[in-house]
Image (cartoon, rainbow, N blue to C red):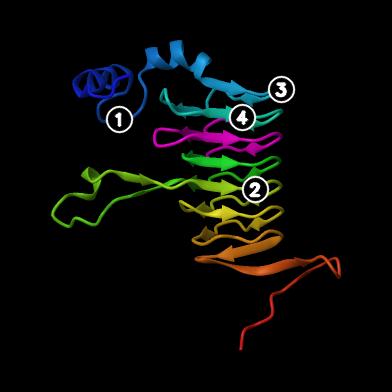
């Protein structure tokens, strides 16, 4: 609707979002958020959670999912879709585009992002080069430990564990435990033996 009308688009953006704090203005949060946020039955968003949402991007949480106080949700660069019975605990930061499956638990202080800052042009300050979205996907039944980081564009497989304080820089296979900086696989579930086993060292 606003294609071909850059001045109008810029003006409307100014009315909705603070020019340099990059947070929606209070009037917009009060009037628009009730229509923008899609909540499943029994879902809870605590009052002190920070929601930085813009129209045109989705923020959806499923059945009995809870967003705790002081969590930060930002869909400015892409949709944030959270499944059923998830727990987003205090001080977690989700920067879209991010998709979480069902029964995902995220420990305090963890960060999952779906974008990266451009930096290639050395003649321009990095802050002025913008960002590049790249969706991060976390499958069902994943536990992400506190103060860990999952960078943009990754896929975290089902029933995986990200140990606290890990920095995940590559995809995580299903049924894996990863730890460290950068995170590496320390255990994987063997469906034949029914045991969690350390990966065999490569010769």
Write down the residue under mark 4.
61
- In percent of width and height, residue 14 lies at 26, 21
Say whether disc 2 or disc 1 marks the residue closer to the N-terminus: 1
- What is the count of numbered marks? 4
Q: Main secondary structure of the magenta part?
A: loop
Q: Residue at x 39, y 15 (%)?
A: 28
Bin the neighbour count of mark 1 within 10 Å (Cα to Cα): few under 14, some 14-19, many 20 and up. few
Q: Earlier in the sequence, mark 4 or mark 3?
A: 3
Residues marked 2 and 1 touching at CB (< 8 Å): no
The residue that label 3 is drawn on is 42
Dots 3, 1 in contact, CB < 8 A: no
**Image check: 23 left or right of 129?**
right
Q: Is residue 20 above or below residue 7?
A: below
Sooner in the amino-acid sequence: mark 4 or mark 2:
4
- Residue 20 as seen in the image, left or right of residue 44: left
Vertically, is 124 above or below 203? above
Q: Does residue 70 show up magenta in the picture?
A: yes
Q: Which residues are magenta?
A: 67-92
Between the residue at mark 3 and the residue at mark 2, the CA separation in whole angstroms equals 21 Å
Occupied quadrant, residue 177: bottom right
Horizontal side of residue 123 vs 4, given as left or right: left
Quarter of the picture holding the C terminus: bottom right
- Inter-mark Cα distance, 1 to 4: 26 Å
Indicate whether residue 77 is drawn in magenta: yes
- In this view, the mark in front (3 or 1): 3
Using the image, determine if residue 72 lies above or below residue 29.
Answer: below
**For residue 139, which numbered disc appears in the image?**
2
Q: Please give the residue where the numbered disc 1 appears in the rendered image.
A: 21
């Amino acid at each position: 609707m606003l294609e071909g009308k850059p001045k109008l688009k810029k003006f409307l953006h100014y009315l909705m979002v603070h020019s340099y704090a990059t947070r929606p203005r209070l009037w917009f949060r009060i009037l628009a958020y009730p229509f923008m946020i899609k909540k499943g039955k029994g879902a809870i968003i605590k009052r002190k959670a920070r929601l930085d949402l813009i129209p045109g991007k989705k923020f959806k949480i499923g059945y009995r999912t809870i967003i705790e106080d002081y969590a930060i949700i930002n869909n400015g660069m892409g949709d944030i879709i959270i499944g059923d019975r998830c727990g987003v605990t205090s001080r977690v930061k989700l920067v879209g585009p991010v998709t979480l499956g069902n029964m995902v638990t995220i420990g305090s202080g963890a960060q999952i992002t779906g974008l990266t800052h451009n930096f290639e042009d050395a003649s321009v300050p990095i802050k002025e080069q913008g960002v590049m979205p790249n969706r991060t996907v976390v499958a069902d039944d994943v536990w992400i430990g506190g103060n860990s980081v999952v960078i943009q564009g990754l896929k975290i497989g089902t029933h995986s564990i990200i140990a606290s304080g890990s920095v995940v820089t590559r995809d995580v296979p299903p049924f894996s435990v990863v730890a460290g900086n950068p995170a590496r696989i320390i255990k994987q579930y063997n469906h034949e033996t029914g045991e969690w086993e350390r990966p065999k060292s490569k010769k």
